[in-house]
């Protein structure tokens, strides 16, 4: 491949400038990759949702509860395999910044509905048996250094008071798309306590989780559940878990759009830098291009020499950027794990990295190529420096 | 004697394309930097201006937002007996019991539902918030199924025009007015009679009690009494502080995101400036030799090239802030993580942000220019004169 050698030698004729440009691209690709990963993290809940799970909630909005008695009616709907229910507990562990999602759920049906939460059999059984028992994801447990058997106190925001739980199990995700930061405990514990303190808030659930027999039944089942409770005091809204999670993403769409725009801006910034480098390079070498033309090389050759050089620079930067993305993502994940339980580099991000690098290479080379091709031989040879 | 400033300036003018490309790169970085800070500032200002220092808000202990709070009727009555409460316009206690719930409404354009705050108000609620002005129609009559909507809601949500009907809680609510609460969170709310709404949503408890202090300094006394009363398990907070707290997590998130982004981006722009300045130095080796031969010192040369780099930063900074200032025309509407409800807020350009952005631009120029300028200053006179 002698052509590659020429391109490489050309590119590194001015070592300092090319080195700086490559560094610039590396940083830009790194930033682009991080932002793309951030957007992916935003959608991680949607990606992890199952097609055979439905979520039923009060149609007014999520803050309104449903009567617990609905569970028996929902169970009778044809196509429904399993019904589980729960409440968003919203408890705070020591300090507000230690956020992790915590729910009161019906343990047996919940764990059956979420086979991706892997829990050893004896931990599962002790959790079932202990009404004050709780199960937490591996990441929360590691973060706070809990041990199975520890008593964990959460301060209730929705349900006032200090709530004590005994950690009975630690679950792992089946694969790395599963959120390992959740904390859940017996719904009965919550309900019995609330019955004593605020009776009017007892026997209410925040949401029902419904397992359907097969994905193609989901739509019909959702419609029949909502039909069941139409015109009742608490009308329901049932959607697939995916649609439910997408709804959350849609509410923060403005921020997401901003991040996406910014991730394009970084590409534009680096385009300006590379275009500048290529413009300088060709300006210095106009005489050489004139000589090449004299020797009989056509536009195609000269054009591909410049484009090739631009490609060598950007691809080098791109590879370095991708290589750095992985450790950077690991660091960000460590720092912002509470906001984003799932934070990993997707395959699509890598393709987009390459696409961005190609785009930068081509657009940076366009003007220099036009200038080099357009030069008249005599004029080019006359120029010095 | 220093090298004339016009030398640096004209050099930039001569190599126009390169100057523009480099400054444009910096301008983009400054633009992102300023925009993100403006967004966080806008969010905080909106929520800071929402509350008033003279008003006290009483919610259930430990509740982080109004939505999760609950104040039973009898507790509300106890709160309203506090002696520090000012007298209202008609001689009664200047206090109001309010209900805050969320409903899902479809947005205009996408049709995607988003959570909107409905606030049930008492007869004093409007007087307690003088910033709320009715711009169209009238206020809802107490005891009726009427509501009024904030400007941001009327603009962004379907079916929220005047005389349209909202359907929730098995009731129809007629919209009789649109109010403008300026740059505050109330603009993203719907207001109706608290007791009617409680009945419709089957809520036996209010969410909060709000009252105006007779004297601002009386706050500590009333807070100690309410927080310490074991019957109540409520807590009192200044309204201004209460809303300002609701912006904390999101503003912090925006700032961290923005600062980490721009610090990465700035490396790109600094590299751009460095390339430009190195090539400026390289192509002017002869000139530098001549200047030195004329008697300019190394420090003069260093200053001249640094000035050139700082000028680049200046152009980038000014252009970046100029374009960022247009962002003030845009209003962002998104869900606040802390309250779980839709909130509209704008970009706010404060003098501090402008100064920080300019400083940032100069730093980029300086870091990009210092190494090339040192190289220029270190050149040997004879060798540089000999260079072609």
Image: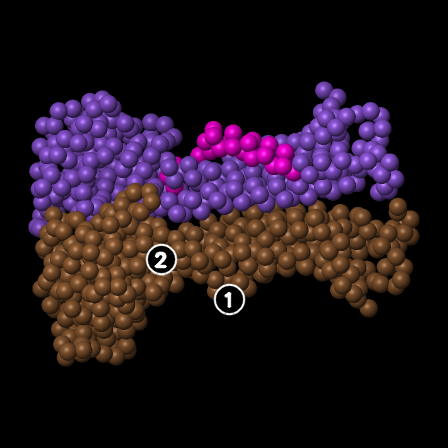
Chain colours: A purple, B brown
Place residue A234 in its image quadrant: top left
Work out whether disc 2 and disc 1 sit on a shared chain. yes
Total label count?
Answer: 2
Q: Circle 1 sits on which residue?
A: B351
Rate crowding at label 1 as few (under 14), some (14 to 19) or many (20 or more) other CA atoms within 10 Å: few
Residue nearer the viewer, B86 or B90: B90
Which secondary structure class fits the magenta region best? helix
x and y percentages locating residue B210 in the rendered image: 21, 67
What is the distance, in whole Å, between disc 2 and disc 1 at their CAs?
21 Å
- Circle 1 marks a residue in which chain? B
Is B160 placed left or right of A20 in the picture? Answer: left
Residue nearer the viewer, B121 or A11: B121
Q: Quadrant of the N terminus of chain A?
A: top right
Q: Circle 2 sits on which residue?
A: B247
Residue A363 among magenta residues: yes
Q: Determine if residue A92 is in view.
A: no
Q: Secondary structure at mark 1?
A: helix
User: Magenta region: which residues?
Assistant: A339-364
x and y percentages locating residue A290 in the rendered image: 83, 33
Rate crowding at label 2 as few (under 14), some (14 to 19) or many (20 or more) other CA atoms within 10 Å: many
């Amino acid at each position: 491949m002698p052509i590659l050698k020429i391109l490489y030698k050309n590119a590194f004729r001015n070592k300092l400038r090319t080195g700086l440009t490559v560094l610039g691209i590396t940083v830009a690709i790194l930033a682009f990759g991080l932002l793309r990963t951030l957007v992916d993290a935003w959608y991680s809940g949607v990606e992890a949702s199952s097609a055979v799970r439905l979520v039923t909630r009060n149609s007014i909005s999520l803050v309104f509860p449903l009567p617990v008695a609905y569970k028996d009616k929902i169970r009778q709907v044809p196509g429904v395999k399993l019904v589980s229910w729960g409440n968003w507990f919203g408890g705070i562990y020591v300090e507000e910044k230690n956020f992790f999602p915590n729910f009161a759920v019906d343990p047996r049906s919940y764990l059956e509905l979420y086979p991706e939460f892997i829990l050893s059999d004896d931990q599962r059984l002790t959790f079932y048996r202990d009404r004050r028992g709780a199960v937490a994801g591996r990441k929360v447990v590691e973060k706070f250094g809990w041990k199975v058997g520890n008593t964990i106190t959460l301060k209730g925001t929705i349900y006032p008071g200090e709530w004590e739980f005994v950690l009975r199990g630690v679950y792992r995700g089946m694969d790395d798309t599963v959120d390992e930061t959740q904390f859940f405990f017996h719904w009965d514990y919550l309900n019995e306590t609330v019955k004593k303190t605020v009776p009017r808030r007892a026997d209410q659930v925040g949401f029902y989780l419904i397992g359907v027999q097969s994905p193609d039944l989901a739509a019909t089942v959702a419609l029949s559940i909502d039909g069941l409770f139409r015109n009742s005091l608490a009308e329901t809204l049932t959607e697939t878990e995916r649609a439910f999670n997408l709804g959350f993403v849609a509410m923060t769409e403005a921020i997401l759009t901003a991040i996406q725009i910014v991730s394009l801006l970084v590409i534009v910034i680096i385009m300006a830098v590379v275009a500048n480098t290529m413009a300088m390079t060709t300006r210095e070498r106009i005489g050489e291009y004139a000589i090449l033309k004299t020797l009989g090389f056509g536009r195609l050759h000269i054009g591909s020499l410049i484009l090739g050089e631009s490609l060598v620079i950007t691809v080098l930067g791109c590879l370095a950027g991708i290589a750095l993305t992985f450790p950077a993502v690991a660091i960000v994940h460590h720092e912002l794990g509470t906001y984003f339980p799932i934070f990993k580099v997707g395959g699509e991000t890598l393709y987009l990295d390459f696409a961005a690098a190609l785009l930068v290479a081509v657009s940076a080379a366009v003007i220099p190529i036009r200038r080099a091709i357009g030069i008249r031989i005599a004029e080019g040879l006359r120029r010095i420096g | 004697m220093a090298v004339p400033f016009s030398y640096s300036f004209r050099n930039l003018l001569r190599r126009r394309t390169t100057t523009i490309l480099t400054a444009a790169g910096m301008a983009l970085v400054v633009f992102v930097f300023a925009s993100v800070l403006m967004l966080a500032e806008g969010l905080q200002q909106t929520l800071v201006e929402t509350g008033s220092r003279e008003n006290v808000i009483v919610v259930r202990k430990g509740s982080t937002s109004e939505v999760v709070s609950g104040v039973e009727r009898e507790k509300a009555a106890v709160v309203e007996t506090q002696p520090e409460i000012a007298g209202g316009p008609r001689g009664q206690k200047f206090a109001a019991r309010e209900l805050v719930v969320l409903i899902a409404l479809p947005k205009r354009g996408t049709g995607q539902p988003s959570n909107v705050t409905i606030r049930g108000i008492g007869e004093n609620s409007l007087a307690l918030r003088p910033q709320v002005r009715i711009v169209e129609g009238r206020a809802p009559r107490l005891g009726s199924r009427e509501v009024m909507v904030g400007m941001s809601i009327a603009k962004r949500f379907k079916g929220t025009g005047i005389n349209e009907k909202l359907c929730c809680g098995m009731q129809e609510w007629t919209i009789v007015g649109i109010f403008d609460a300026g740059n505050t969170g109330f603009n993203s709310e719907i207001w109706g009679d608290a007791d009617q709404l409680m009945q419709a949503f089957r809520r036996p408890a209010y969410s909060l009690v709000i009252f105006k202090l007779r004297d601002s300094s009386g706050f500590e006394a009333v807070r100690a009494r309410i927080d310490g009363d074991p019957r109540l398990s409520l807590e009192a907070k200044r309204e201004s502080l209460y809303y300002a707290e609701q912006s904390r997590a999101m503003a912090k998130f925006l700032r961290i995101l923005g600062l980490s982004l721009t610090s990465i981006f700035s490396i790109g722009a600094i590299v751009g400036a460095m390339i430009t300045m190195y090539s400026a130095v390289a192509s002017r080796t002869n000139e530098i030799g001549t200047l030195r031969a004329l008697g300019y010192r190394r420090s003069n040369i260093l200053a001249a090239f640094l000035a050139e780099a700082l000028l680049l930063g200046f152009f980038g900074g000014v252009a970046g802030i100029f374009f960022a200032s247009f962002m003030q025309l845009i209003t962002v509407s998104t869900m606040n993580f802390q309250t779980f409800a839709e909130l509209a807020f704008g970009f706010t350009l404060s003098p501090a942000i402008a100064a920080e952005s300019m400083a940032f631009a100069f730093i980029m120029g300086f870091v990009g220019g210092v190494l090339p300028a040192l190289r220029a200053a270190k050149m040997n006179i004879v060798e540089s004169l000999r260079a072609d």
